[in-house]
Image: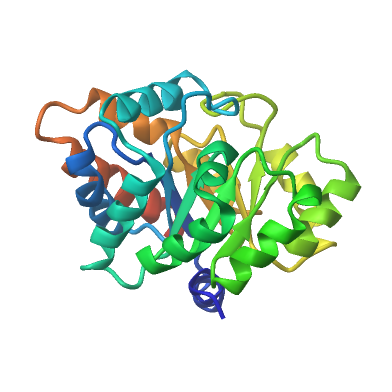
Amino acid sequence: MSKITALFKELKATGKKGLIPFITAGDPDPGMTVELMHALVRGGSSVIELGVPFSDPMADGPVIQRSSERALTHGVTLHSCLEMVKEFRKKDAHTPVVLMGYANPVEQMGAERFATEAKAAGVDGVLVVDYPPEECVDFAARMRVAGIDPIFLLAPTSSHERIKEAAKIASGYIYYVSMRGVTGASHLNTQDVASVMPKIREETDIPIAVGFGISDAASAKAVSASADAVVIGSRIIRLLEDAPPGQAVQSLETFIREIRDALDSQN
């Protein structure tokens, strides 16, 4: 059983929901990333999504695009991200880490080498935004052989066939994009999200994490009523952008704790 699967089983047994924050590796500074990851855990995160910076992040809005640009300016690469996970693992062997990014860096490294090095670094899951499930049977199998969960995106526009394809090869969790558009979009409709969950659950018992448009405790709590976990990304990047010098780590931990408390108040 993978670390992510075990985590969600534990959450379900205790009646809790997962909290999955996203940060971009190397933003605002490469030397802060591991410290920020530990702050996320202290705040109550269940899984950490660590973004691999990319020059053309087509699914990301301006906030996360800026974070990628800052990280790339610092010279952060896929190899750098793996080194950050390895450093994080020196103090935390428990919290699952998912690398989230785009196909180009993975393909430049090569899928086989990526699987080997990611596992050695302590990566538990990988979500490649521009890898559609129907074209990734071999990639998903290679990841699972390495002990890494292949995670895929579904969206309001996903057909029934796309849902079935994702359900067949995904593991760990499925990431449901709550609205059309890019990250950082607004107008989250929790009723729309709730109406789609049964359609996905008809095809799979894999946990469903919902992201895009979740920006505060209230929206996280509302979405968690029908989802197994919530993902928060753009709001965290904005928080790091706006935090006064020297206060980013504490501001992040405080924010995550607020979301964790709201999720736990469902019980």
Residue 236 placement, left or right of 137 = left
On the image, which quarter does residue 73 sit in?
top left
Residue 183 in the image: above or below residue 194: above
On the image, which quarter does residue 29 sit in?
top left
Single out the residue that lies furthest toward the right: 161
Single out the residue that lies furthest toward the left: 246
Image location of residue 132, percent across then percent down: 74, 44
Q: Residue at x 72, y 47 (%)?
A: 194
In this orientation, does residue 266 appear? no
Residue 199 in the image: above or below residue 142: above
Front residue (pair 55, 50): 55
Residue 164 in the image: above or below residue 160: below
Residue 11 placement, left or right of 195 = left
Residue 113 placement, left or right of 68 = right
Colour style of the rendered protein structure:
rainbow
Front residue (pair 172, 207): 172
On the image, which quarter does residue 226 sit in?
bottom right
The quadrant of the image that shows the N terminus is: bottom right
Front residue (pair 82, 166): 82
Image location of residue 126, percent across then percent down: 54, 54
Image location of residue 13, percent across then percent down: 54, 79
Q: Residue at x 43, y 37 (%)?
A: 216
Image location of residue 254, percent across then percent down: 24, 45
Residue 257 placement, left or right of 19 = left
In this orientation, does residue 225 appear? yes
Front residue (pair 234, 35): 35
Q: Residue at x 44, y 60 (%)?
A: 118
Single out the residue that lies furthest toward the top: 62
